[in-house]
Amino acid sequence: MLRRDEFPLDPEIVSGLESIDATLTGEAVDPRHAELAELALLLAADRPVIEEGFARLLDQQVRERAFSSPSRARAAGARRKHPAVRRGRTRWWVWAPASAVAASLVAAVVIVAGESRGGSSNGGSAALAAPLMKAPASARRRETLGQGAATTPSTTTQMLAPIAPQHHSGAQSATSSAGASSPVPSPPSTGGAGVPAPLLQPPTGGRKVIQGAQLALTTAPQRVDQVSQEVYNVIGQQNGIVKASSVTANGGHGGYAQFQLSVPSSNLARTMAALSTLPFAHVSSRTDNTQDVTNDYRVNQQRLNDARALHTSLLKQLANATTQAQIESLKARIHDDEGAIAADESALRSLQRRVGYSQINLQINSGSIPVPLHHGGGFTLGKAAHDAGTVLTVAAGVALIVLAALVPVGLILALLWWVTRTARRRSRQQALDLA
Amino acid sequence: VIESLPARESPTTGAWERFEALYRSSRNDLFAYVMTLLRDRAAAEDVTAVAFERAYRRRRTFDRRRGEERAWLFGIARNAALDELRHRRRQAQLVVDPEAPATDPVTDEEAEVALRRTAVRSAVAQLPGSEREIIALKFHAGLSNAEIAKVLGVSESNAGTMLYRTMEKLRRACDATA
């Protein structure tokens, strides 16, 4: 490839250069360039000759491969140029990229390990929480009229995933006042996203129990919409109703959602299990409530039966009434009794609805989600691949950040190198011109 | 003058042998070039030693595709010599006239040659450093025009033109002296 400063030579110059080369090799020269040839011979003959002492010294240095300046007087300069000093230089341009890659990998492993520890501790508290959760004890049978609400036992079991679970005081009092009736199985606990919670068991033995739950989920800011849609899907699958909902998304920077859900009590356990294991969501807290309203129900039922019996009796008395005063009095009592029956029926229907449908208050908050350490099983290739992918992703991210920081530094260094090289070249040329 | 240098047993014997051959073929030429450039024997000896030391240290980085070993070695020597000139310029201006061999002319013809040699030497001493360098590379180091071009970092035609013009300048100077 031709250089930029390559150009065809003038024939006269070519001829002169050929004459010079011919003179130096002892060949015949064109007589036109006799002066040039003589000058070339004189220049070649005036070549400086190396001194024998220095030649021997240099030979010895080469033989021993130990170079040093021959001039003791210039020892300072020689030390500066001594190879022993230069050989100590490390090849940073070889080690720097390797060190950067190694640092990225170490940072990735540290980050992933840190996240894994967070998931592990979370799971650990969930595991601890499970045995501590107590089922609502069945209530003593108290069917005395007028004591329903006051004596109805209620239990609230709350579990906060990140912290130790605690019982509400009501639950404790209910437990302490519980009788020897058949206990209700434990409500579920959850260990976080992807950890299936034990199923809530609906009460058995024909008892009337109102169930409810509060669930708080945490998801990534950009996943609030997606998790909300999953909630709708779950409620639809469980034949439930979304009584109220509020989803607020802030373009990936935050957001939250609130739901008031109503599901058939027979599906509450499956619903809570499904909501607790939604993808991309993590259970931050969960509270399960139960309230045994068997007494209330029976009291209302008895009151209704009594009202109906009274109504039948009054109708019979009205049929047998003879005086207008008796008739008027019975009609008034029947009217009152019908009002009481309607009220009792309404209260009973309301109670049946509350027993038949459980209320769930669900809240979705945006935040960071801890990475679960285990998914309820041992080591699998899938988990290993997932972990490897996570490590590689984090490593790539760290490497990208490092690269973003190194590129400007590299450009600046390259510019400095170019400026230094150019300055040195100019300085050398100036020194040559002045020599 | 050059002694045979026994090669040591080493994993890099090939590289060492190449370096040794380069040293044997270039030692005197390199010194002559540096001496003409610096015009100071002590400094020229230092720079020659430094040039071989650097060449020995960098012998594995030599890339034959970028030129011949001789041009590469003279490039190293050139940088070392120019650094020496820079260093000297910072400290003090040291001007040492070219050494004239002490020979007494016997015949008229020898006297005439000595006279012309003195005129040429004087003309060379008056040349700027860059022109004196090209004379040193061509006639004292024995480099080809292509090698000179590699050492100076210019094209071969450029190097040839520079050499020819310098020779013409010298010829005119010598004629003027005569």
Image (spheres, coloured by chain):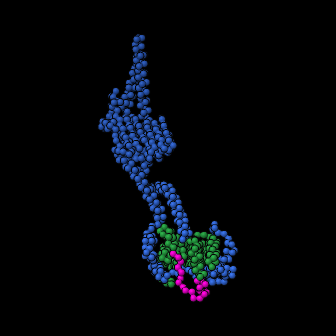
Chain colours: A blue, B green
- Residue B112 at least partly seen: yes
The percent coordinates of residue A208 (x first, y second) are: 39, 34
The structure residue drawn at horizontal position 63% and vertical position 76%, both measured from the top left corner, is B176
Residue A384 versus residue A314 in the image, above or below: below
Direction bottom: furthest residue:
B107
The quarter holding residue A46 reads bottom right
In screen coordinates, is A18 left or right of A133?
right
**Where does the magenta region start and end?**
B96-114
From the image, give the main secondary structure of the stretch colored magenta.
loop
The percent coordinates of residue A27 (x first, y second) are: 65, 83
User: In this orientation, which residue lies closer to the viewer: A37 or A138?
Assistant: A37
User: In this orientation, which residue lies closer to the viewer: A223 or B128?
Assistant: B128
In screen coordinates, is A159 left or right of B164?
left
User: In this orientation, which residue lies closer to the viewer: A134 or B71?
Assistant: B71
The percent coordinates of residue B102 (x first, y second) are: 53, 84
- Residue A233 at least partly seen: no
**Number of marks drawn:** 0
Residue A379 versus residue A71 in the image, above or below: above
User: In this orientation, which residue lies closer to the viewer: A39 or A252?
Assistant: A39
Assign the C terminus of chain A to one quadrant of the image. Answer: bottom right
Task: Determine if the magenta segment contains residue B106.
Answer: yes
The structure residue drawn at horizontal position 49% and vertical position 75%, both measured from the top left corner, is B43
The structure residue drawn at horizontal position 42% and vertical position 25%, both measured from the top left corner, is A343
In screen coordinates, is A18 left or right of A92?
right
Residue B48 versus residue A357 in the image, above or below: below
Assign the N terminus of chain A to one quadrant of the image. Answer: bottom right
The percent coordinates of residue A31 (x first, y second) are: 69, 82
Task: Determine if the magenta segment contains residue B64.
Answer: no
The structure residue drawn at horizontal position 42% and vertical position 16%, both measured from the top left corner, is A331
Residue A373 versus residue A8 in the image, above or below: above
